[in-house]
Image (cartoon, coloured by chain):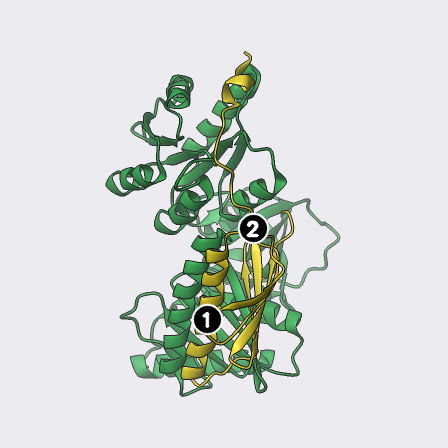
Chain colours: A green, B yellow
């Protein structure tokens, strides 16, 4: 753990700030403690220096805690955030969690409660923020599977990436089956291995599971790695244009299979080029998408509504799902006859697959 | 430790989420409103303005919309276009 980690405490009352400083000095990792009595000053400090954790009160004049957290979430996505408040209200607890805070803690009234808070805080300071599969950071799914098979384990991996869910069965170090999204066996295994990140959990072994995979884990991993390289790199003798065309065909095929009409993506970077599949109007649609992104951002901050999940829209010709992803926004068009709930789930699945 | 009393300090009230509906004309003026009167009118007017501009910008992009529903983590805003104005429904999302 980095010994120089910094914690910023935001509370409008200087007396409490002093109390907090004394308490946090007991943390085993001995982080640097900084304080601020206003949201504006706290934001300036966060801009100037990298902090690990922000501890924020809710009730403050001028800019309240929810407003600060809303801005912090957008500007400093890596920052861990903790609400420490005297407000015992379910609405504000829910809203704070909806803003992505890591911990919502009522101001401690006993030494025992304070000790528990310090332990939680220490855990937050130590939590790794690297990408990869949650649980074993910085290891790819291939690494994890190889380790399980080498140790002759028997287990079931349940892997989740967004709305996609897959399972891989391992028995006595042998890969015996895989299943995801209607695919089973080797096809399912290859599809799951294509997911770049996600979360996984291990479930109890299922010795009775029917075996559908007979190849060795190493042979399959090698084949899958080669297939992934071929998708991301041009095939032998294939020009970059041909590779791009192949990807476009694949995307259109997945869109058609789900029953969608067209998709437009607008990069968050204003200089980025929008892309369209099934439509020629991507430029003007992307302009509206960027406008809509800014507008909902303003609305979110003004009303303190939390981050945008998605927008559903419709007119006489189509239904639309507008959904922000990592570096871009997607707009997916569906026929008017589509079920509103289904198109949201299908859009999520499509975006997750395309982005994987 | 008796720290609870120490924390019982007078503080400004936190703003609750708006809940209710409103009708706005094409100029963005609120015609009818069922949102609590304790909720700041200027914020409701800004919501109305953003909603009307979202409809207008969509028309400019040749994507005229009759309705949209914005799903924020804590609040849903539903807007239906009505002769240049809009019906707007504000409903806080349920607890986690």
Above or below, comparing residue B26 to residue A279 in the picture? above
Q: Could you tell me which residue is drawn at 30 percent across and 71 percent down?
A: A272
Residue that carries the numbered disc 2 in the rendered image: B17
Q: Residue furthest right?
A: A208
Residue, disc 1: A330
Percent position (x, y) of residue A283? Answer: 35, 81
Horizontal placement of A208 versus A180: left or right?
Answer: right
- The residue lying toward the viewer, choosing from A335 and A290, is A290
Q: Is residue B20 above or below residue A17?
A: below
**Circle 2 chain:** B
The residue lying at 62 percent from left, 83 percent from top is A336
Crowding at label 1, few (<14), some or many (≥20) Cα neighbours within 10 Å?
A: many
Residue A165 image-quadrant placement: bottom right
Examine the rendered structure and indicate whether residue A73 appears above or below residue A353: above
Q: Between A127 and A268, which is closer to the camera in this rendering?
A: A268
Q: Residue furthest left?
A: A48
In the rendered image, residue A19, in percent from the top left (x then y), is placed at 41, 18
The reply to whether residue A230 is visible in this rendering is no
Q: From the image, which quarter does the N terminus of chain A lie in?
A: top left
Apparent side of residue A252 relative to residue A42 in the rendered image (left or right): right
Q: CA distance from mark 1 to mark 2?
A: 28 Å
Considering the numbered disc 2 on the image, is that residue within a helix, a strand or a loop? loop
Residue A147 is situated, as x and y percent measured from the top left of the image, at 50, 45
Which chain letter goes with mark 1?
A
């Amino acid at each position: 753990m980095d010994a120089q980690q910094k914690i910023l405490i935001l509370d409008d009352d200087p007396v409490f700030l002093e109390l907090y400083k004394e308490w946090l000095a007991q943390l085993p990792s001995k982080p640097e403690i900084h304080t601020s009595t206003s949201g504006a000053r706290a934001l300036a400090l966060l801009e100037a220096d990298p902090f690990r954790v922000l501890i924020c009160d809710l009730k403050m004049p001028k800019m309240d805690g929810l407003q600060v957290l809303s801005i912090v979430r957008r500007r400093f996505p890596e920052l861990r955030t903790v609400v420490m408040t005297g407000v015992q209200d379910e609405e504000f607890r829910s809203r704070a969690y909806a803003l992505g805070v890591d911990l919502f803690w009522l101001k401690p009234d006993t030494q025992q409660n304070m000790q528990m808070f310090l332990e939680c805080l220490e855990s937050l300071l130590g939590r790794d923020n690297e990408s990869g599969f949650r649980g074993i950071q910085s290891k790819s799914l291939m690494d994890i599977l190889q380790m399980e098979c080498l140790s002759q384990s028997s287990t079931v991996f349940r892997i989740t990436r967004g709305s996609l869910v897959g399972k891989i069965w391992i028995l006595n170090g042998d890969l015996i089956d895989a299943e995801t999204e209607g695919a089973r066996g080797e096809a399912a295994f290859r599809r799951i291995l294509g997911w770049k990140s996600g979360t996984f959990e291990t479930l109890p072994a299922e010795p009775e599971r029917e075996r559908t995979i007979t190849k060795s884990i190493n042979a399959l991993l090698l084949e899958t790695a080669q297939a992934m390289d071929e998708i991301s790199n041009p095939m032998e003798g294939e020009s970059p244009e041909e590779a791009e065309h192949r990807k476009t065909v694949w995307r259109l095929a997945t869109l058609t299979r789900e029953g969608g009409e067209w998709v437009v993506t607008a990069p968050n970077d204003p200089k980025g080029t929008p892309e369209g599949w099934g439509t020629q109007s991507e430029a003007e649609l992307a302009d509206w998408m960027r406008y809509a992104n800014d507008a909902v951002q303003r609305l979110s901050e003004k009303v303190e509504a939390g981050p945008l999940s998605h927008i559903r829209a419709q007119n006489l010709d189509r239904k639309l799902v507008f959904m922000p992803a990592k570096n871009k926004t997607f707009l997916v068009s569906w026929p008017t006859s589509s079920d509103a709930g289904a198109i949201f789930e299908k859009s999520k699945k499509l975006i997750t697959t395309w982005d994987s | 430790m008796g720290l609870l009393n120490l924390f019982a300090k007078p503080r400004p009230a936190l703003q609750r989420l708006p809940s209710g509906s409103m009708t706005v004309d094409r100029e963005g003026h609120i015609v009818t409103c069922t949102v609590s009167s304790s909720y700041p009118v200027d914020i409701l007017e800004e919501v109305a303005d953003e909603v009307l501009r979202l409809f207008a910008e969509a028309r400019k992009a040749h994507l005229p919309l009759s309705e949209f529903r914005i799903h924020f983590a804590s609040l849903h805003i539903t807007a239906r276009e009505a002769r240049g104005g809009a019906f707007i429904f504000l409903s806080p999302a349920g607890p986690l």
